[in-house]
Image (tube, grey):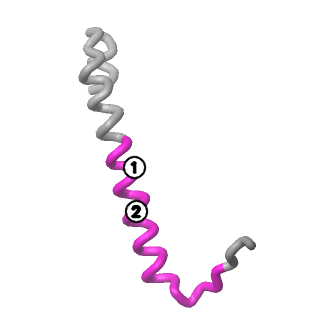
Amino acid sequence: MIQDAHSFMQTDVVFVGILIFAVAGKISDSFVRFLENHLLKWQIVVKPN
C-alpha cells in the first residue's frame, strides 16, 4: 500500500499507511507488556535508583 502510493505520489495514503503501522506497533507493544506483567509476576524486577 505504501509502496504503491509512493509510486503514484499519493502522500496522504503514505501518511495513513505510516499511521496504521504506528498504531499497530503501539497496540502490539502494549499487549506484550500486559502479558509480561501478568504472566511473569514471579520474576524479580530491578528498578534503577
Q: Residue at x 39, y 49 (%)?
A: 25
Q: Quadrant of residue 4?
A: top left
Residue assigned mark 1? 25
Left/right of residue 12 with respect to residue 34 in the rendered view: left
For label 1, count other residues whose C-alpha is less than 10 Å away and answer few (under 14), some (14-19) or many (20+). Answer: few
Q: SS for tag 1?
A: helix
Left/right of residue 11 with respect to residue 36 in the rendered view: left
> Which image quarter holds the N terminus?
top left
Can you give x and y, in whole percent of width and height, for residue 38 in the image?
43, 82
Residue type at numbered disc 1:
Gly
Q: Residue at x 52, y 86 (%)?
A: 41
Q: SS for tag 2?
A: helix
Mark 2 vs 1, N-terminal side: 1
Residue type at numbered disc 2:
Ser
Picture layout, residue 2 above or below residue 6: below
Can you give x and y, in whole percent of width and height, for residue 45 in the image?
64, 80
Q: Which residues are magenta?
A: 22-45
Can you give x and y, in whole percent of width and height, for residue 13 in the image?
25, 23
Left/right of residue 26 with respect to residue 1 in the rendered view: right
Q: Is residue 48 magenta?
A: no
> Which image quarter holds the C terminus?
bottom right
Q: Quadrant of residue 43?
A: bottom right
Q: How many marks?
A: 2
Picture layout, residue 27 above or below residue 22: below
For label 2, count other residues whose C-alpha is less than 10 Å away and answer few (under 14), some (14-19) or many (20+). Answer: few
49 or 11, which lies in front? 49
Disc on res. 30: 2
Picture layout, residue 15 above or below residue 41: above
Task: Determine whether label 2 and label 1 are within 8 Å by CB.
Answer: no
Q: Residue at x 41, y 74 (%)?
A: 35
